[in-house]
């Protein structure tokens, strides 16, 4: 497989390695400055480095999914790709896609990244998702096409940013199902 035809663009393939290597490298660079910088400043520099790697990974996921949504011969390919991305991104135990009508009232991941349990918001930033399937509805141009039913891993607490990326990926699945490619929203 050539570099240009690999499954993920270069930033997505490099992000895990960068996430492991960048913080220790930044620490090495900061060693000569340790007497001049407070611990707070050092921590802030490390946080910025880690966030930069996470942002690159998220953007690469969106880019790859948008590319696939434009070029796939079948929407099922895009739905399967998005399902795999959701499992990885949100640290899920499992995920499936259901076409068609809504059944039941499971917890739901909303468009703004909040998780709703019934009519109340769930504190997903602190508690992670509820320990039951969470739905992520898939729309395109206001039309409902289905939903991803996501089974969270106990103890995993995906960030709001990761949840927002998940919503953008689901929008790309909706676009593929509808047969109309869209430009991903930030």
Image (tube, rainbow, N blue to C red):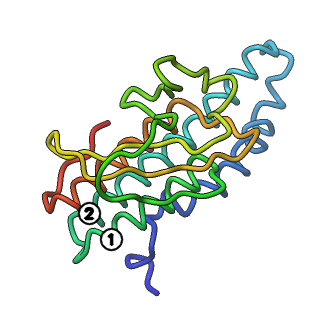
Residue at image position (21%, 54%) is 175
Residue at image position (42%, 59%) is 97
Q: Is disc 1 in contact with disc 2, using a CB cutoff of under 8 Å?
A: no
Q: Earlier in the sequence, mark 1 or mark 2?
A: 2
In the rendered picture of this protein, how many numbered marks are placed on residues? 2
Rendered position, 185 above or below 177 = above
Taking depth in this image into account, of 186 and 85 the one nearest to the observer is: 85
Quadrant of the rendered image containing residue 94: bottom right
Taking depth in this image into account, of 38 and 64 the one nearest to the observer is: 64
| Furthest residue toward front | 104
Report, in whole angstroms, how far the alpha carbon at label 1 lies from the one at label 2. 10 Å
Query: Helix, strand or loop at disc 2?
Result: helix
Mark 1 packing: few (<14 Cα in 10 Å), some, or many (20+)? some
| Furthest residue toward bottom | 1
Mark 2 packing: few (<14 Cα in 10 Å), some, or many (20+)? many
Residue at image mark 2 = 69
Query: Helix, strand or loop at disc 1?
Result: helix
Residue at image position (67%, 48%) is 19
Left-right relation of 20 to 34: left
Residue at image mark 1 = 76
Residue 31 point in image, percent of width and height: 84, 31
Residue 180 point in image, percent of width and height: 13, 58
């Amino acid at each position: 497989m050539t570099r240009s035809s690999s499954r993920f663009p270069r930033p997505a393939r490099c992000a895990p390695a960068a996430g492991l290597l960048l913080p220790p490298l930044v620490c090495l660079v900061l060693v000569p400055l340790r007497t001049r910088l407070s611990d707070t400043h050092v921590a802030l520099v490390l946080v910025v480095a880690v966030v930069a790697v996470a942002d690159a990974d998220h953007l690469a996921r969106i880019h790859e999914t948008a590319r696939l949504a434009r070029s796939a011969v079948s929407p099922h390919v895009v739905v399967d790709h998005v399902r795999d991305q959701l499992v990885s991104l949100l640290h899920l135990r499992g995920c499936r896609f259901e076409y068609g009508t809504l059944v039941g009232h499971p917890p739901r991941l909303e468009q703004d990244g909040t998780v709703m349990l019934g009519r109340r918001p769930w504190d997903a930033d602190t508690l992670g998702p509820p320990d039951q399937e969470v739905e992520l509805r898939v729309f395109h141009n206001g039309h409902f096409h289905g939903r991803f039913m996501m089974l969270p891993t106990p103890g995993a607490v995906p960030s709001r940013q990761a949840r927002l990326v998940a919503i953008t990926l689901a929008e790309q699945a909706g676009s593929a199902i509808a047969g109309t490619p869209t430009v991903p929203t930030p």
